[in-house]
Image (cartoon, rainbow, N blue to C red):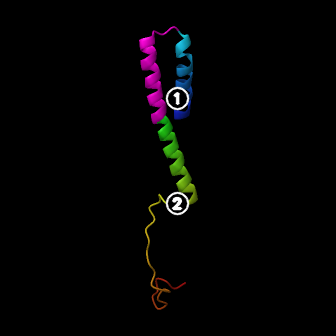
């Protein structure tokens, strides 16, 4: 089950809980628990969307390391000759 479908399921539970004849003391726990799970899942979805946006646009999360070059390669070196 994906996180998006869990959010929809929890929203349905929160919406229908008052109409199902659940005792008031249980309703508090059900709605509080569903709300807490919605907060966690919403944060997780937002965080993953943020990381996807960073990877697509600026690639800040990559493992690229910076190497400073000291000019053009040595032409006498056979390794760089074409």
Label 2 CA crowd tier, 10 Å (few <14, some 14–19, many 20+): few
37 drawn magenta: yes
Q: Identify the residue under disc 1.
A: 6
Residue 26 location, x and y as percent? 43, 14
What range is drawn magenta here?
A: 21-40
Residue 12 location, x and y as percent? 56, 22
Q: Quarter of the image containing the C terminus? A: bottom right
Label 1 CA crowd tier, 10 Å (few <14, some 14–19, many 20+): some
Residue 21 location, x and y as percent? 51, 8
Q: Identify the residue under disc 2.
A: 59
Horizontal relation, residue 16 to residue 31: left or right: right
Q: Main secondary structure of the magenta part?
A: helix
Question: For the point 44% across and 61% down, which residue is it?
Answer: 63
Please tell me the numbered disc located at residue 56: none
Residue 69 location, x and y as percent? 46, 81
Of 56 and 79, nearer the camera is 56
Of 46 and 75, nearer the camera is 46
54 drawn magenta: no
């Amino acid at each position: 089950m994906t996180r998006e479908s869990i959010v929809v399921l929890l929203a349905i539970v929160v919406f229908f809980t008052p109409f199902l004849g659940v005792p008031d003391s249980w309703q508090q726990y059900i709605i509080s628990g569903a709300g807490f799970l919605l907060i966690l899942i919403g944060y997780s979805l937002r965080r993953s969307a943020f990381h996807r946006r960073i990877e697509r646009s600026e690639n800040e999360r990559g493992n690229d390391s910076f190497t400073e070059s000291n000019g053009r390669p040595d032409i006498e070196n056979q390794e760089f000759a074409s």
